[in-house]
Amino acid sequence: MTRGRRTVAGRASVTGTGLHLGRPCTLTFAPAAPGTGLAFVRVDVPGAEPVPAHVSHAVQTERRTQLGTGEAAFHTVEHVLAALAGLGVDDCLVECTGPEPPIADGSAAAFVAALTAAGIVEHGGTVTPLVVRRPIRVTDGESSYEALPADGLVLDVTIDFPHPAIGRQRTSLPVTAEHFRAELASARTFGFVQEVEALRARGLIRGGSLDNALVLDDRGLVEGTLRWPDEFVRHKALDCVGDLALAGRPVQGKIIATRPSHRGTMRLVQAIVADATTQEDAVQLGIEDIIKLLPHRYPFLLVDRVLELEPGKRVVGIKNVTINEPFFQGHFPGHPIMPGVLIVEAMAQVGGLLLLGTVEDPDTKVVYFMSLDNVKFRRPVKPGDQLRFEIEVLQIRGRVCRIQGIAKVEGEVVCEGEMAAMVRDR
């Protein structure tokens, strides 16, 4: 779903010291033109060019998210990006007088306060979310992720640390501006006393202190109290919001992250962006196109539209189920349920469109299905439902193909199975 693009109405600044490099910096949020996106620029370096906040400019580094390389690099930008993305800012120039934003109190609260003071306004143009349309799974060391279709952005984050004050924690919430402000923005970064010496030996956490991080020894917090009992996992969710902003557009999907890391989330973003690009390049078919390819006609044409078609790989089609379907007259009077065999037939027709996309002169061919395996029905399909069929190729040998199909209603699987088919001349 598209919405109006947003930027800041005025300028607002945050001043302090960076966490890892330990250098002073004043960061200023400034308005940007529609379509500019989020970008960082060094105002203390003459002629410096803005660095877009996009995964294509991200660098895999230890314990932080980095944009760019060398003297032009920006370090530890995740909390700034989390504030911008969490509040729904699409276009903003982030001016910095140093290579690393202030760490403030270790959360995104100072940046949220600055953005709120500047004001957030719509300023022309629209932004289209980066929609997760099929499951995407990524593993990076101990970090694992699954991205699933959903309305809006939903985070489900789990961490597991062998420490009595942390242990296994999980948080799950929709990422709206309201939830971000109330549930995530003030969650602080954390670390362990036993790691301090080794990290500083590697040139990290030079600006770290008890004022900008939760520090734990063997017994618990060295100083202070938690803002929430599960503040640790909330901060990891905050980091995920910031790193997901590297997609360049708002991500729409449910992200299940287990032991997330900056590097792992970056790899997930790369996978989401690549998959969305493939989908946006995929062929779509209206009913007129479908009729040219399939020989079926009323009342046996059971595909209304093809949303995605990657010939030889994958197809997504839909069937709108209405009370006017002729089979509801007898199946069953007073209790209309779509026959399971017709759900499978509709799935087969969508699969047929996938197979016909692999041959020349498809309007002269027909698909004969040869076998069905592992077919399961999960729940009834009734008038008013929209069936979404997701079909993937398992194997192609000549004109014989095996495919795997899933039928869903509102994201819930109603039928699944495997099929073998052959393409023949009509």
Image (cartoon, rainbow, N blue to C red):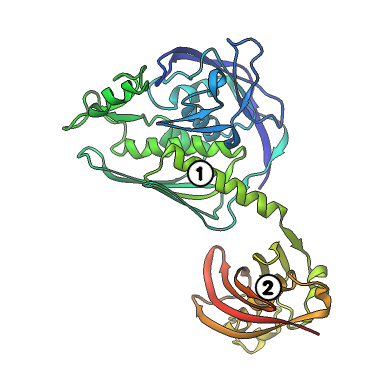
Q: Nearer the viewer, mark 1 or mark 2?
A: 1
Closer-to-camera residue (127/375)? 375
- Looking at the rendered structure, the secondary structure element under dot 2 is helix
Position of residue 239 in the picture relative to residue 394 (left or right) = left
Q: Which quarter of the rendered picture does the C terminus lie within? A: bottom right
Decide: few, some or many residues near mark 2? Use Cα within 10 Å; few <14, some 14-19, many ≥20.
many
Q: Position of residue 140 (x, y in %)?
A: 43, 46
Name the residue located 28 percent from the left edge and 37 percent from the top edge.
229
Give the percent coordinates (x, y) of residue 59: 52, 32
* Most foreground residue, 260 or 402: 402
Instruction: Give the side of residue 69 with respect to residue 165, left or right.
Output: right
Name the residue: 54% across, 17% down.
71
Residue occupied by mark 1: 267
Q: Residue at label 2?
A: 350
Q: Amino acid at mark 1?
A: Arg
Q: Please identify the quarter of the rendering in which residue 335 is found.
A: bottom right
- Left of 8 or right of it: where is 240? left
Q: Earlier in the sequence, mark 1 or mark 2?
A: 1
Vertical arrangement, residue 316 with respect to residue 20, above or below: below
> Which numbered dot is residue 223?
none
